[in-house]
Image: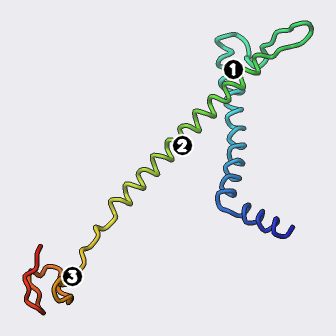
Amino acid sequence: MKKFLKEFEKFILRGNVVDMAVGVIIGAAFQGIVNSLVNDVISPLLGLVANTDLSYLAFTIRGVEIRYGAFVTAVINFLIMAFVIFLLVKLLNKLAELGLRKKEQEKPEPQKPATKICPYCKSEIPAEAVRCGHCTSKLEE
């Protein structure tokens, strides 16, 4: 049981789990804003066109009320949330791409080694040398 609890603790304290929890909480708060936008702004504006509030549209079949207006409002909520999340992900991807480009531009070019080994006498000589200073052999490029 202790091993199980240790594994659970390791899982729960990983960074991505905490990040996901924060995202869920912010998403729930954002859902309240979107619901208010749809219920308090968009539905009344659409109601001006249709001369009614969408969320109260319903019809009755054999005594059962089917509230299709509430469904339309939920679909509008979903579309707005999906669009905003799409824009947010697109923005984050753009920022990540810009960050990668900046890192690539900042990378210094790999430096050439200052010395090389003479293939004949195996002595260390300057990298630009065309002749070995130790054995005087002519070096190939």
The residue carrying mark 3 is: 116
Is 74 located above or below residue 141 in the figure?
A: above
Disc 2 crowd, CA 10 A, few/some/many (<14, 14-19, 20+)? few
Q: Nearer the viewer, residue 34 or 109?
A: 109
**Image coordinates for residue 72, horizontal then vertical, percent:** 71, 20
Residue at 65% of width from left, 24% of height from top? 42
State the SS at label 3: strand
**CA distance separating discs 3 and 1:** 79 Å
For this view, does 10 lie left or right of residue 61?
left
Q: Quadrant of the N terminus?
A: bottom right
Residue at 72% of width from left, 38% of height from top? 32
> Quadrant of residue 75 in the image?
top right
**Image coordinates for residue 139, horizontal then vertical, percent:** 10, 79
Q: Which mark, residue 44?
A: 1
Q: Looking at the image, tell me whether mark 2 or mark 3 is earlier in sequence order.
A: 2
As shown in the figure, which amino acid type bears the numbered disc 1?
A: Pro
Q: Nearer the viewer, residue 20 or 44?
A: 20
**Image coordinates for residue 128, horizontal then vertical, percent:** 14, 79
Mark nearer the viewer, 2 or 3: 3
As shown in the figure, which amino acid type bears the numbered disc 2?
A: Val
Q: Looking at the image, tell me whether mark 2 or mark 1 is earlier in sequence order.
A: 1
The residue carrying mark 2 is: 89
Is 88 located above or below residue 11 in the figure?
A: above
Q: Which mark, residue 20?
A: none
> Quadrant of residue 62 in the image?
top right
For this view, does 86 lie left or right of residue 107?
right
**CA distance separating discs 2 and 3:** 50 Å
Mark nearer the viewer, 2 or 1: 2
Disc 3 crowd, CA 10 A, few/some/many (<14, 14-19, 20+)? some
